Amino acid sequence: MDKVSAEIDEQTDGLLCADVAIDAGSYAHGKSVYTYLVPPQIESRLGVGQLVWVPLRRNVGVGMVERLHRDPPTVPLKPLRSLVRPAYRLNDDEIDIARWIARETVSTLFAAASPFFPPGVEHASTEIYELVDPDSPAPEELTSGQHRVFELLRDRGALSRQQISRAMKSNPVASLRALEEAGIVERTLEVEDRQPGKRTERYVQLVTFDLEAVARSPRQRQALEWLEQRRKFLGTEGDVTAVRELTQQDGITAATVSALEAKGLIEVTEREAGEHPTPADAAPPPVLTSAQAAAWRFIEHALEEGTDQPILLYGVTGSGKTEMYLRAAGWCLRSGKSAIVLLPEIALATQIVRRFEERFPGQVAILHSAQSNSERFAAWSAIAQGERSIVIGPRSALFAPARNLGCIVIDEEQDPAYKQDSEPRYHSRRLAEFIARQRRLPLILGSATPAIETAYRATRGEIGRLDLPERVLFDAGGVDTVLDRSSSALPKVTIVDMRAEARETGSALISRTLRQAVHTSLERGEQSIVLLNRRGMSTIVLCRSCGRSVDCPHCDIPLVFHRDRDRLVCHRCNYQMPPVHVCTACGGTLDYFGAGTQRIEQEFNRLEPGARTLRIDRDSIKELGGFEKAIERVEHGEADIVVGTQVVAKGLDFPSVTTVGVVQADGALHLPDYRSAERTFQLVAQVAGRAGRRAAQGIVVVQSYTPDHYAITSAAAHSYEDFYADEIAFRRQFRYPPFSRLVRFLFRAASEQACRTEAEALALELAEHAASRNVEADLLGPAPAFAARIRGDYQWQVVLRAPVDSFDRLLDDLPARPGWLVDVDPSQMI
Ligand code: ADP
Ligand code: ZN
């Protein structure tokens, strides 16, 4: 055993070594895979993909075994410490995915693999001691203290140091160390068990519908009939019911259930209860419209065949995309497979989550960032153990340990939230496509306004495309399905030219058209949503005499006045100061200009004093108790006018909202980012698609200073096709994606000169790299970033642009100097 502890360098020939990906902390290309010796006592339990504890500087840290070998080492090696307990191993597919991510996103293998680790594994751990060979007798030479520890571990198995101390009524540090050094005791680290006490629920499933067998018991007969009815009504998805629901029926008791179970007519299983209890009146799956039926036939075929070409499901809001996801998930369940459904922002998608839980009670695992560690661990374990087969979550859900995956769905695939904004900077769509090809399964990309890249690939046949052109409308009772093929099913959009409005009325905040629309909705007892993508009260404070603005001392951008906090706030670094009224430069009087959501709220309070106005933005959300609560309040009709930032545009489906206003639709249009037109279009189109989803008499008012821009006009006309035609021409002409791929390099330093020097050096290296790979790349920059200063530091950037088909050649050994942030396929250029 001392082979592994003492002078190792001379005796390592032929010993097992492990290459371990560790958290090297540094960016890319820094060495992040290190070789360790494998202590003989764990050799047999160690495999590739295993999580292990390794010595890291003065600490221990988690690492993942990437390779096992017996290559003679060239430098002295340290032994790895132990396996992570409970033992966890990434499978070969997962390791392949991690390797792919590391290369694609220029990140370390550890960073790329870590999203697969069980939640909480990196931090909380306890030291555990156990005998290496519990069956061998106690060695003779032990001291009495060591002997007592030995016997304790032999009798009780693995124990934490705390448990040992408690049992021995002392802390046997020296004995433990001696036993460990002698190779008698093994010390490991165990991930703390985070599983909270499970709440379980009993479920019942009909096995045989045999009325003869219950002929003499009317209650059992009644129970069987109830179950059978439910199955008929709900189809296979209605098979499993909570026992609780059954016993709620008149006359049916727990005894009835046991009797049926004893006869083998039903099966009762105990499972972890759902986060939301199953409503008793789960809606049956609707009869598909003909367009839906055609789309479903295609998807079902792809599921059966394992067709891995992605499918773009292109359909307006309300056309039945979610119904297709539900059916795909149902197919997976019936086939003993699992499904992963990605949503851009789970907190804003309560309606979709509810529909999955209603259709598949007890089968849905929800993952999201707001979960506590133990909640996340519980969901993760339920997925890993196959207890829950439908995984719903944000981009990280792609890493869930789903068993026998059958399909992946990405809803609102155009959403920028699918790009991870810290290492590893992967895009969920690309990653999902890789996984789909690796496992031969369909990837469904749903959108009413697909990302330009996705639509472009669909036109080239790289992605399949299914259209759901019609909105499904309901009559008031929600029973009959009405299809409306004409555009009258979509709300009418009015563009207001705010230049003219300002000229004619001297005011450019809320136009007359928007006021009137909100007023009309109010009179009818309906709701309005008014959107402005900027928080605060006044967005700029200007001096009347010298014209200077009050700026953040660290970021050089104007401070925004927040009335609720009575503070001037920097929206980039959150620097705050009390409001000032005299210019520090010249002593002149300061004026407060520009509008944020607080100003709009104030304005509507003035215009409609009788109405209840609710502001939903980052400043108010805490007070409102979170998005879910805020949305509930709107749903329950507790607000007449909702004023908010873009968050209110997402995931909302309020039947009684009939007026939607966008205060400054072109706010983002002139930012130096090739995606600014796409973002603007997406925002306006999304909002326009929401208004009066069920009641087609909704009106949308779009206020703009550039009312003729194609991003505004095509969104107002509900025409994705028009927008696509203009936008793809722009991208082609200026060689932006999808006609090229970009890598954004960003550097931050306290001095501007340091940024410039670094950026120029990197640019040179990049140019040489491209030339050496024979790639016709070009560079945008080096130049100060759009956010030229942040928290006192300067920022410079270099963007590398290369043709799509040769881009891949650049990825290996892409130059990346220390301190640089590297973003492949950036979703933001500013
Ligand atoms: P999307 O995801 O495209 O917005 P949904 O799947 O949410 O569309 O469908 C919109 C609404 O119409 C939902 O309430 C859904 O239950 C309902 N619906 C969808 N298809 C049908 C259908 N064929 N018959 C009746 N109702 C339907
Ligand atoms: Zn600042």
Image (spheres, grey):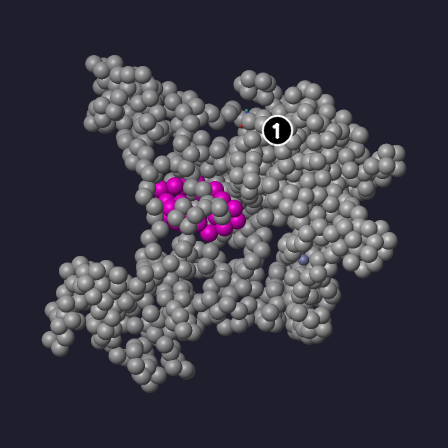
Give the residue type at disc 1.
Ala
Residue at left 28%, top 79%?
A: 3
Instruction: Count all numbered tags in the image, as a single digit.
Output: 1
Residue 174 in percent (x, y) is at 23, 73
Q: In the displayed structure, does residue 738 sit left or right of residue 118? A: right
Counting from the top left corner in percent of width and height, residue 574 is at 63, 54
Where is residue 213, by image quadrant? top left
Dot 1, how many residues are within 10 Å of its Cα: few (below 14), some (14-19), or many (20+)? some
Q: Which quarter of the rendered image does ligand 2 occupy?
A: bottom right
Q: Is residue 6 above or below residue 243?
A: below
Instruction: Find the magenta span and give its range.
Output: 376-404
Nearer to the camera, 293 or 372: 372
Residue at the (56%, 44%) spot, across then down: 344
Which image quarter is the N terminus in? bottom left
> Is residue 273 in view?
yes
Nearest the camera: 799 or 249?
249
Residue under circle 1? Answer: 639
Is residue 391 located in the magenta-colored stretch of the structure? yes
Residue 189 in percent (x, y) is at: 32, 63
Residue farthest to the bottom, as pictured: 10
SS at mark 1?
loop
The image quarter containing residue 799 is bottom right
Q: Ligand 1 near label 1 (Cβ, under 8 Å)?
A: no
Can residue 334 be seen in the rendering of this structure? Answer: no
Task: Tell me the quarter of the picture where residue 469 sits.
Answer: top right
Residue at the (42%, 27%) spot, across then down: 279
- In magenta segment, residue 187: no
